[in-house]
Image (cartoon, coloured by chain):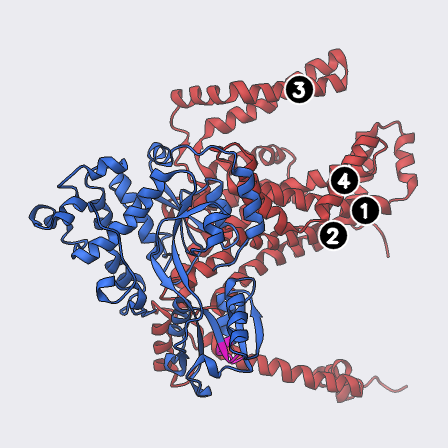
Amino acid sequence: MLSSRPAPNRHVGLVGWARENLFSTWLNSILTFLSVFVIGFVVIEVVPWIIQSSWTATSLNECRAAIIEAYGEGTHGACWAVIRERYLQLLYGFYPSDAYWRPNLALVLMLIAIAPILYPVLPRKMLLFSAVYPLLGIWLLWGGSLWTMISILLGFAIGYILMAASSRAFGTLTGLITATLGIIIYWIFAAVPLSELLQSIFPRLWLEPVESARFGGFMLSTTIGVTGIVSSLPLGILLALGRKSDLLIVKAICIGFIEFIRGVPLITLLFVASTLLNIFLPPGTNFDLILRVIIMVTLFSAAYLAEVVRGGLASLPRGQFEAADALGLDYWKSMRLVVLPQALKVSIPGIVSSFIALFKDTTLVSIIGLLDPLGLTNSIRADADWNGIIWELYVFVALIFFVFCFAMSRYSMYLERKLKTSHD
Amino acid sequence: MRLKSLIAATTVVGLSAGMSVAATLDDVKAKGFIQCGVNTGLVGFAAPDADGKWDGFDVDYCRALAAAIFGDPDAVKFTPTTGKTRFTALASGEIDVLARNTTWTFSRDVDLKFTFVGINYYDGQGFMTHESLGINSATELDGATVCIQTGTTTELNLADYFRANGMSYEPVPIETNAEAREQFFAEACDVYTTDRSGLAATRATAEDPNALVVLPEIISKEPLGPLVRHGDDQWADIARWVLNALIIAEEKGITQANAKSMMGSTNDPEVARLLGTEGEYGAMIGLSADWALHAIEARGNYGEIFDRHIGPDTAIALQRGENALYTEGGLLYAPPFR
């Protein structure tokens, strides 16, 4: 018997790999050469531009002079100095610099708050923090008295108690209505005096208020994006369920809403938020522009999510719904325990795509005069020192957007693998 | 820059026409600052610095206005507005005054129901081209490719000008000034046309500004100025006379530095009236007697503001030209202060 011999050289190692993957056919060889040429061209053109740069200049002209001095006449390099001078502005907008810890803390706490939602292995008690976080985050970002938030929160507690008490006595629907009315009455009449009273007794829980006009840069994008994402998912699920509902009016409202919002470009909704609403509201009402934008973005995103989730619902076999009914589960229980876990799992890629799209769509707010990262690039260029700088700013903004969106996309892939139950 | 959102704005104005306008001055005094609409960013006219503090030619007018009312040039908040949002922001009362290099036109004044309080910069549309093309006059531009911002009056002016001169051109539509700059520098178009102040600012950013020439022709009138809503004449008067005070100050040689000393030492009765040592002019307009002094001390007189942001010593290096005082051959002519 012959002893086994090593494979011929041209089938192993680098050469073998290249033959196998890059030069297996004539067509592949041509494509390989073309790709190498294109990549090489880009590298040769772009890398020197990135490296032969200036980090310390204070204006575009100084940048150019410094680059020519360092790398010789005719060199074109990036002027990263503009990023060095303005990166804080691109990140935080006009937020007071001694209060940068507040958005930072809000971001860290947000990650803690979404952790138990993203990673089910974490203790369920953390969800309590997630529930409180929205108000905490708003307080950190906008400042004011923490008691305002606490008294708003108290409204939910009151609603819960009313709900529990009256639904035991009169049934679920009455309970729901009483609770809703109770919360609204409490918020309108009691919340503000209560928070003022508590504030005067315990004045320490107070942060310097920061007005919305000072929000900008990535902080603005993240605020709008995250709030939009968090609030549009439940709304979108409800809309999807409503669209499949047997209740005629609910169904009609949901279909009308979804089709209307999907039929209108986001930019139109933003214009409505920034200009039309001003006119319809009574003069003197100061309805915050960022809040208006968040509401519009949420509604917009919810309509798209609703259709994504409806796709997931449609993919479930009829038997799943019937099985849930057969178990004697009521509507909400069958949705929560049987239908939605499966439907949402199918919809994950679509949902995450919507989130990524929503996050990137936040840059549209620059058109209505909010200074998001892209809006700020224009403002920075309006500084006579930096007028004419284009690529450096866009590269920086693109890089940060990429980090955010790539993280989201990776997480969705992790989630898909984890939730995968099929064996194909 | 002159992008008209006429339809949107007129609808809006129509809706708000029924809204009664309270005395803006009282509202402003009650809230303790003025809300001033400015450009989201235009070189020399309005831009935030690294600390977020706004600065620029239009911004300084707002600071002078704030100083006239409150004695404090920082009693002003700036709302960045785009070409699409500026008119609704003013009509809806979100801002008290709009100082956003806005061209004074008939329809904006009459149809959109705004009051232009004066002209703080006389601009006009011009052409910039590459020196290597050897073009010396806009009349030689037949058949040229022209970079032009879409949806602006610049586009209409350009079409009018070429038609009137029996020439043809090929438009390269672009959206923003930054994009135009890239296209023009990459020689994707022979000519770039926009307001001459914008051309100068763009030219200043070129690696070799001398390779670019601004042609002598000016094909449109673009009188830029601050504006307020119709219906509150007192507020319009204040806005108008703050601008006039800055111009008179330059005429009379009152500067940021010497305003206070001139107040005591002047023999010129008009200066005395302006600075509040003679007559009751402050009370007439609803402000303190020394309102004009504060306005001038805020950021200097018109000439000082011009020189600081767009004048010959800045990167943009605009000459005074039409924006010189009438005594020096320009168009700036403030009515007498008496």
Instruction: Let me know if marks 2 and 4 both belong to one chain.
Output: yes
Q: Nearer the viewer, residue B193 or A3?
A: B193
N-term-proximal mark, 1 vs 3: 3
Task: Judge depth for marks 2 and 4 and give the one in front.
Answer: 4
Q: Are marks 1 and 4 on the same chain?
A: yes
Where does the magenta region start and end?
B184-191
Q: Residues within 10 Å of mark 2 (few under 14, many from 20)?
A: some
Q: Judging from the image, what secondary structure is the residue with disc 3 in?
A: helix
Check disc 1 and report the residue beneath it: A312
Q: Answer yes or no: do the residues labelled 1 and 2 have beta carbons within 8 Å?
A: yes
**Marks 2 and 3: same chain?**
yes
Which residue type carries mark 3? Ala
Q: Residue under label 3, please give it.
A: A179
Element carrying mark 4:
helix
Tell which chain the image draws in red: A
Q: Which residue is mark 2?
A: A350
Residue that carries the numbered disc 4 in the rendered image: A256
Q: Earlier in the sequence, mark 1 or mark 2?
A: 1
Amino acid bearing label 1 = Gly
Q: Chain of mark 4?
A: A
Which SS type dominates the magenta stretch?
loop
Amino acid tagged 4: Gly
